[in-house]
Image (cartoon, grey):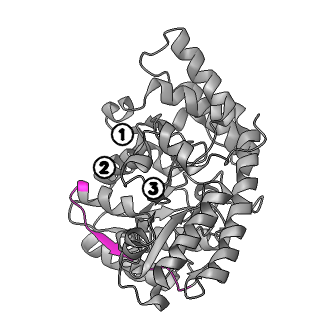
Amino acid sequence: MTDRILTAPADALRRSRTSLKWRAHPSDVLPLWVAEMDCEPCPAVVEAVSDAMRRGDTGYPWTRDYTEAFASFAATQWNWQIDPGTGVVVADVLSGIARLLEALTDQAAPVVVSSPVYNAFFTVIDSIGRKPLDAPLTPDGRLDPEALADAFARATTGGARAAYLLSHPHNPTGTVHTSVELETLAGLADDHGVTVISDEIHAALVYESGSFTPYLTVPGAERGITVTSASKAWNLAGLKAGLIVPGPEARAAVGSLHPFVTFGASHLGVIAHTAAWTGGVDWVQLLVQELDSNRHLLAELVADQLPGVRLQLPEATYLAWLDCRALDLGDDPSARFRERGRVALSEGPSFGEGGRGCARLNFAASPEIVREAVRRMAGSVD
């Protein structure tokens, strides 16, 4: 295994990478926006995918190994016992969420979210003809029981079937919801008949060991559904696969999904994710150590060079939420950082009403890139 995972300089990445992250902006812009890491690949994944290609194993996926690999990983990491036979493999987390919302909610019912929240949630909701209903996070980035109760009551008016999309760990704030918060959420959802769909794609990237609680393990969450993948923690967005895990009382609903829903995963994606969960644990633990160092470095740099920006140290993920409202840069401060500083961040308003005046920064890069990005950003607002 390599000694360092996040090492490549920007010029080398720009020459070698052909993905969206490195092609969407001019070559003089540092791309710290989309959730893609500047990392060396996990050796176990490289070996598994390369072996498959060498033997011509490029057909349709056999998914049982995938569900069993995640069940073993979940049991080891979080003491979460899953029946692999109940899992449903899908193309990716977002398509899985879309199919669940179509099947489990009424067309006229809104989908509840807590902004600022993963911007793709809004795209998925719109793509299936639903509308979002906001139950905003508290100012310190926690779930707000009063806001949730009010939104759930409004969403289920007239007995409508409604859902709540939970980002856990939370994207973009990096908050890890506590077991108490999750239990409160489960109780509110049960009281109002709301289905909780928990996106746990960043669960392997939590900094304090033992602090992550899978939603389906808390009392009252039996009607909930988890959707997850190895794509974020092992940087496998280009190798498509995702997994739906139903709670005990949601198995019939998930089992009723049309079989076509399960056809989207890539066979190479299934192979890659399976290898990540079975042979890539040491790699991801080293990655988390480097990301931990980067998040503290970023916090120090922002405090020193961008004192008008509020950064709450993320508890998980490689994403930092920058509250730039004190700088008076308008609703979308990322525009200033991109145009004057030549640093691309994710646009705050795309994360919902709670994102105005904010921006999201991806710090899964070498420390040198993080330092250069903050230096440019500071220069753009001097």
Q: What secondary structure do most residues of the magenta stretch adopt?
A: loop
Q: Earlier in the sequence, mark 3 or mark 2?
A: 3
Does residue 126 sit above or below 55 in this rendering?
Answer: below
Please tell me which residue is depicted at 71% across the width and 31% down the height of the picture.
279
Q: Which residue is mark 2?
A: 103
Does residue 294 sit above or below 154 in this rendering?
Answer: above
* Residues packed near mark 3 inside 10 Å, few (<14), some (14 to 19) or many (20 plus): some
* Residues packed near mark 2 inside 10 Å, few (<14), some (14 to 19) or many (20 plus): some
Give x and y (percent) for residue 60: 41, 19
Q: Which residue is mark 3?
A: 34
Magenta stretch containing residue 130, yes or no? yes
Please tell me which residue is depicted at 35% across the width and 39% down the height of the picture.
257
Give x and y (percent) for residue 10: 55, 50
Give x and y (percent) for residue 153: 36, 78
Tag in front: 2 or 1? 2
Query: Which image quadrant: the N terminus?
Result: top right
Please tell me which residue is depicted at 35% across the width and 82% down the height of the picture.
331
Magenta stretch, residue numbers: 127-139
Q: CA distance from mark 3 to mark 2?
A: 29 Å
Tag in front: 3 or 1? 3
Q: CA distance from mark 2 to mark 1?
A: 9 Å
Q: Earlier in the sequence, mark 2 or mark 1?
A: 2
Q: Which residue is mark 1?
A: 256
Tag in front: 3 or 2? 3
**Mark 2: which amino acid?**
Ala
Q: Which quadrant holds residue 240?
A: top left
Please tell me which residue is depicted at 36% across the width and 73% down the height of the picture.
335
Q: Secondary structure at mark 1?
A: loop
**Disc 2, disc 1: CB below 8 Å?**
yes
**Mark 3: which amino acid?**
Val
